[in-house]
Image: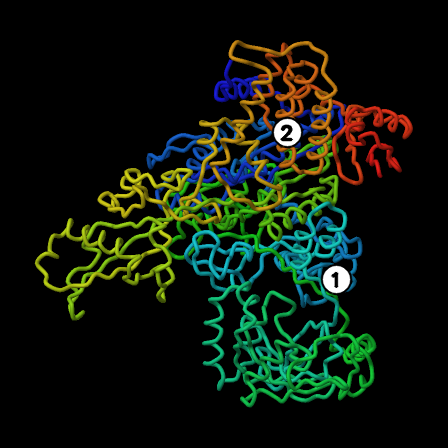
Amino acid sequence: MKYNPNEIEAKWQKYWADNKTFKAENDSEKPKHYVLDMFPYPSGAGLHVGHPLGYIASDVYSRFKRYQGFNVLHPMGYDSFGLPAEQYAIQTGQRPEDTTRVNIDGGVDKEGKVIAGYRKQLDNIGFSFDWDREVRTSNPDYYKHTQWIFIQLFNSWYNKDSDKAEDISTLTAVFEKEGNANVNAVCDGAIEAFSAGEWNAFAKETQESILLQYRLTYLAETEVNWCPGLGTVLANDEIVNGVSERGGYPVIRKKMTQWSMRISAYAERLLQGLNDIDWSESIKESQRNWIGKSVGAMVSFKVESQKSKVESEQQYIDVFTTRPDTIFGVTFMTLAPEHELVSQITTPEQKAEVEAYIEKTAKRSERERMADVKTISGVFTGAFAEHPFTKEPIPVWIGDYVLAGYGTGAVMAVPCGDERDYAFANFFKGQNGMQEIKNIFANVDISESAYGSKDNVEIANSDFLNGLNYKEATKKVIEELEKLGQGKGKTNYRLRDAVFSRQRYWGEPFPVYYVNGLPQMIDAQHLPIILPEVEKYLPTEDGLPPLGNSNKWAWNTVTNDVDFNEKIDNKTIFPLELNTMPGWAGSSWYWMRYMDAENPNEFASKEALKYWESVDLYIGGSEHATGHLLYSRFWNKFLKDKGFAPTEEPFKKLINQGMILGQSAFVYRVIPSILSDDKTEMLRKGNALPPIFISKNLLGDFAISNEKNELRYFLRDEKSEIVYSTIEKLIEKHSGFLKNIEGYEITFNIQYHLPVDVNLVNTSDELNLEGYKNWRQEYKDAEFILENGKYIVGREVEKMSKSKYNVVTPDDICEEYGADTLRLYEMFLGPLEQAKPWNTAGISGVFGFLKKLWRLYFDDNGLIVNNDEPTKDNLKSLHKTIKKVADDIESFSFNTSVSQFMICVNELSSQNCHSRAILEPLAIVISPYAPHIAEELWSLLGNTESIATVAFPVFEAKHLVESEKEYPVSFNGKMRFTIKLPLDLTKEQIEEIVMKDERTQKQLDGKTPNKVIIVPGKIINLVG
């Protein structure tokens, strides 16, 4: 009876689906365990073998926890809103909802492209997901709750006194009674004070405008990352090296009115909460750095003699500094180019230079500017600020190393105490607006570099701070600034409020309409507000977002429904918001929806939330450290404040799986040229010939690199002569003109790193030549310079990606070897959290192991399992494996479990073990990793219930206790033979047995040893 994985796996996948084997219950008496994977974006490319790594690990763990008696929630869904679907819609005209549905469920899109479908691919790998709880963030029955959460955020403010979000009605109640003078809130800066009487006298529109400055989601003009190529705003984590992560389009900085989330209100709680969760230190440190807590002072510098919009208004430059003790060392100030004061204080003489610099800076992202510590650039505005103590004028510059989104967008530059200020001051030394560097540190030489340490500092040349250390001077200067009304102590955070608008179609519509330009929330009972049909997915001709293309996108406050734009009268029918929510909106709360996925009325019932509480194990990529993982914690904390989420943190334990890297394949193209003898006339260019490719090992060591990294040329010598002569023959074959030329010379370059589809390369790195010719039209007539009749490709390990042609799909592996082989192999590759290269050649070894496991149970004639009593060695092999696998799963060391399976099967095979008492529990132990073969073995052993429903075998330590010891018997320190003896013998008993052994008598040859050294359980040595 042979092992047939395709037949077995199809059978058991159907059984699990029909019987809902992995359905979790919300009212179980069992203890709960919630295991979650970061859900995927369903792209048309489908899954490659790198994607399931985390899913397989979580599935092994979920199955094991079920064996331990837990009610396990292990769901799956799709983060189905996203830019790729919209970009594809723009290119092909297909509706994003249609292509997204095909990408998930499989089928053929309108372009005729056959899509396997994520669901089918996942099912084929045998995951124990509870599919009844599937969510898709782009389904209206899901995003109605995302819209509802947005409304809750809009109707909330953050009370610093209670340190939590509260309903906006509690704030208006305070305003009505006492105004805002005593309100301690996280809000916009520079809100004017008003009394209760003034508040009550304000028009409704004025009150709403004021409340927008307190709400947790609000409209404001914000400096954003604008990507013209994608037509939308991007978050910082969506930009890589100054271009969009999706598509590689340039990104510029510009001001736009956007929805924002006041995540900064939760900065301290987000920071402190890291102490209470079991995450890797690297992820925690990423979030700590992103939150960026710093303690210092806010200092206000008066702007000197510049006219303002209001003639009598005194302007100030507010600066946050962590080193207020160095205030007497300030020699200039630098504003971010985007700072609102720049246009107001720049002198006419400097205006052109300043504006040119601002335009140039707008083309660089914040991340790019932060990372670039070598480039020094800036422009003097012509304006001066006044030092709060010395009253001396301080020149004001702009520079792109200062960011508008960090602190106040302005720095007081102290070159003697900061390396970047020091470099800036020296770079512009002697220019108009740059003063000499002041040294305010006693006994410190700053002629070569700045002194940035706070340790052993003695302040000098600083008036009332002279002789003080860092702490003393900091305290003193804050006291004096407060007396002047020009500063105070402050804790600052780098964390900025999150821009929440996207100028895209394929995203959640905002439940917002506008009355007199002010946002109004649609009542929750009328949700969801469903995306309208549009003909075009690009912005409108007048620059509005794609929803501006809809002729039915207005809100009727009488019928409480979406109405036609032509009916807008701004009395009962009003315009709806044209932006959509960002990609991270739906993923910021989805784990709670899984708890009660079919609830039509609320995102989850209180009972379900109370039972499941939070995710016990979360597995996903570390690239989400400062995006999804931060936003999710923010939303969870907010929902906790409002009484919905039961816990402060959403994910107790987080594991970041490493990446499975692809093995890319490359070919090498020869680009020949034929020149006349005097090299004055090129007779023929290589592009007149068909493509010529040279096998890797023929390149040898005689290739010389030129300025372009991808091209190299050859020296003609003995080693390369065979290559030259072959090319000469190919040129003659395809052109036939060389015979008519008396003198010529062939030269050629080699184009390196031309990627080839890895599916055209075998495990010996040999290229399928006919397959390569058929791969692309331009290669149909290609010629190949072979080595021993074969074309050998180059190889390189890099990220698995469709663009690199190195994708291996799980479908192909499952078809040829079975899903259990894929699951075991991915777990066997190495530690879960490390990156590791994929090598299809290694699959066959794992497949061979499963066949060897099968042969413990079956031979060609059928079942060979018997009821024989297991031997001690049988039991030892089994219980070693039970303990090892249980320990490994709990510690997520999955790769060493697979090694132990192989050891165990080898041992049992050599022991000729076919005992049911051993093989039945062995099937259970291996089933979390290879569930299909385990189910089949379990069933054929006569069991009627699924193996998924039984208990994990109990480890019995007694089977690992050794009763015998194989002693080395030495004579004068040299081991001559071994003897197996019971471990409970005394020294005297051991000596008696050894001395009577005939091998001892032969070694002694009638002599009596001077001494017999015996250490029970270790050694026997006869001396003399």
Residue 433 lies left or right of residue 736; in this view the side is: right
Residue 1008 visible here: yes
> Which quadrant of the figure has residue 400?
bottom right
Nearest the eye: 580 or 512: 580
| Looking at the image, residue 447 lies above or below residue 56 | below
- The residue sitting at 16% across, 71% down in the picture is 678
Residue 529 visible here: no
Three-letter amino acid code of the residue under disc 2? Ile
Mark 1 — residue? 180
For the residue labelled by badge 1, is the local secondary structure a helix, a strand or a loop? Answer: loop
| Looking at the image, residue 841 lies above or below residue 909 | below
* Quadrant containing the C terminus in the rendered view: top right
Mark 2 — residue? 903
Image position, residue 903 (x, y; %): 64, 29
Image position, residue 164 (x, y; %): 75, 51
Counting residues from the start of the chain, the first of labels 1 and 2 encountered is 1
Nearest the eye: 280 or 1006: 1006
Three-letter amino acid code of the residue under disc 1? Asn
